[in-house]
Image (cartoon, rainbow, N blue to C red):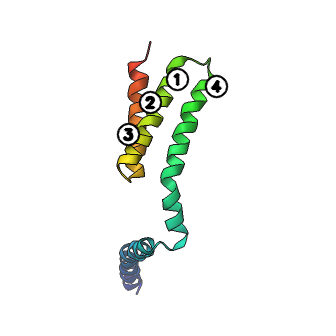
Amino acid sequence: MTWWVIVIAAGVGTFLIRYLPLLSGTRLVRGEGRLSRFLGALGLAAIAALIVLSVSDLWWQAPHWRGGVRLALGATAVLLVQRLTPNVGLATLVGAGVYGAAGWALAD
């Protein structure tokens, strides 16, 4: 008896693992629900978090011109990639990469 309960529970679990993302995906395509709004704002929140992290370097330590240059280069890269492509994730990734490369290049 318990063997069949385990088998049926595993089958139902496997079905739900495959069905629930499909159900969420159709809602996302239509733009319905809280998950759609959350994912729509996620890219902008990531960019804002990177900017806050970059600016915090300017006020926690003794401000140095290198921090401002890194921030300007990273923000410019984000804006440029966002203008060229509608992909917020790519813009965030490129901006973080440029910020890190500028920090490495401008190191003492």
In the picture, residue 96 is in which quadrant? top left
Report which residue position mark 4 lands on.
59
Q: Residue furthest front?
A: 83
Q: Nearer the viewer, mark 4 or mark 2?
A: 2
Among numbered discs 1 and 2, the one appearing first in the sequence: 1
Q: Nearer the viewer, mark 3 or mark 2?
A: 2
- SS category of the residue bearing label 4: helix
Q: Residue furthest right?
A: 59
User: Measured along the vertical axis of the image, is residue 87 above or below residue 14?
Assistant: above
Q: CA distance from mark 3 to mark 2?
A: 11 Å
Amino acid at dot 4 = Trp
Among numbered discs 3 and 4, the one appearing first in the sequence: 4
Q: In x, y percent, where is residue 105?
A: 38, 20
Residue 73: which disc?
2
Could you classify mark 1 by the number of other residues whose Cα lies within 10 Å: few (under 14), some (14-19), or many (20 or more)?
many
Q: CA distance from mark 1 to mark 2?
A: 10 Å
**How many marks do you count on the picture?**
4
Residue shown at the point (50%, 30%) measured from the top left: 71
Residue shown at the point (54%, 32%) measured from the top left: 54
Q: CA distance from mark 3 to mark 1?
A: 18 Å
Amino acid at dot 1 = Gly
Report which residue position mark 3 lands on.
94
User: Measured along the vertical axis of the image, is residue 14 above or below residue 8?
Assistant: above
Could you tell me which quadrant the N terminus lies in? bottom left
Residue shown at the point (58%, 31%) measured from the top left: 55
In the picture, residue 3 is in which quadrant? bottom left
User: Measured along the vertical axis of the image, is residue 33 above or below residue 45?
Assistant: below
Among numbered discs 4 and 2, the one appearing first in the sequence: 4
Asked whether the beta carbons under mark 3 and mark 2 sit within 8 Å of each other, the answer is no
